[in-house]
Image (cartoon, helix red, strand yellow):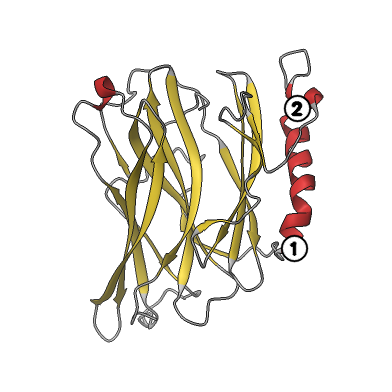
Amino acid sequence: MVRIVAVFLCLVFVLPQAAAARELTDAPDAEIIGFSPDGRYFAYEQYAWDIVSDAVYSAVFVIDRETNALVPDFPIGLVPEVVDGRFPGSVGGFEPDPALIDTGDGTPDLLGLRRAVRAEASVRLDALGIGLGGRRLAGVPVTQRGPVDTDSQPLTFVLAPSLPGAVPDTQHAYAISARQEAEPADCYNELPPVRIKPVSFDVVAWQSYPETREVARGSTRYDWQVPAESCATGMWIADVFAPPEQAETGTSVVVLFMTQVWQSAGDAAGWHALFVGLPEGAE
């Protein structure tokens, strides 16, 4: 796994003793590619130039609403992992131009690599009809450095635009937060193997008219694969998106979030996405 880590972010939760005194580099970035017109598929790109390993990578991911899993043949591009003895690892049949990865002067061509990955992925994305942006409902930019207390405050949103004023909003509002199981008490000495850590994305729905009250709760599970010999140090919800079209049954939103782990040689961070169902009876 590439040794990268988030800059100081407002985490949904964090183990306070982790990596506090370490010399850290920057987090990877993410760019939204979009949805299919029916809202079934959601695509994003993760990319970075990791100055610790002096490696560049870019990969396109597509999530299927019906399974909440990656669509076959994705991701495509380069990922910060060893694949078939190569680092960064090539996935999805992508074969990069070596000149993009090593220019010989210590400045790899990240933009060129991203363009090559997008070009390679375009046929598969077009086959799924991916390109519509959807609506961003809530989030905190990964570059925002101001005080945002997302440690204790969930992200809140409504599905449709509303107007401020004296008239109460009649649509339901939602609050989303994430929780994970605690790490082993001696995780930093045990160096556990690769494991699945369940993460629950909890949603509370409430109404403000004719009275303010909670109307429903729901939860969606995500299985976070934590790398070997590492300890999960936190995760951070960056964005919540509404697809351009909802399924015939069940309203859902897409959550884009970053995870961070401690490793003995450095820290690692990565982006993930999933469809989170809104509580039944709250529509």
Residue 188: assigned label: none
- Mark 2 and mark 1: Cα distance apart in space: 28 Å
- The quarter of the picture where the C terminus appears is bottom left
Q: Residue furthest bottom?
A: 210
Q: Could you say which is closer to the camera, residue 282 or residue 262?
A: 262
User: On the image, which quarter does residue 230 sit in?
Assistant: top left
Whole-percent x, y for residue 107 in the image: 72, 19
Q: Which residue is mark 1?
A: 127
The three-letter amino acid code for the residue at tag 1 is: Ala
Left or right of 70 in this view: 33: right
The correct choice, above or below, for 109 with respect to 179 in the image is above
Whole-percent x, y for residue 128 in the image: 70, 64
The correct choice, above or below, for 219 with respect to 104 in the image is below
Label 2 residue SS:
loop
Whole-percent x, y for residue 163 in the image: 46, 76
The three-letter amino acid code for the residue at tag 2 is: Asp
Label 2: few (<14), some or many (≥20) within 10 Å? some
User: On the image, which quarter does residue 29 sit in?
Assistant: top right
Label 1: few (<14), some or many (≥20) within 10 Å? few
Q: Could you say which is closer to the camera, residue 9 or residue 72?
A: 72
Does any portion of residue 141 appear in the rendered image?
no
Does any portion of residue 203 appear in the rendered image?
yes
Counting residues from the start of the chain, the first of labels 2 and 1 encountered is 2
Q: How many marks?
A: 2
Residue 109: assigned label: 2
The correct choice, above or below, for 12 with respect to 219 in the image is above
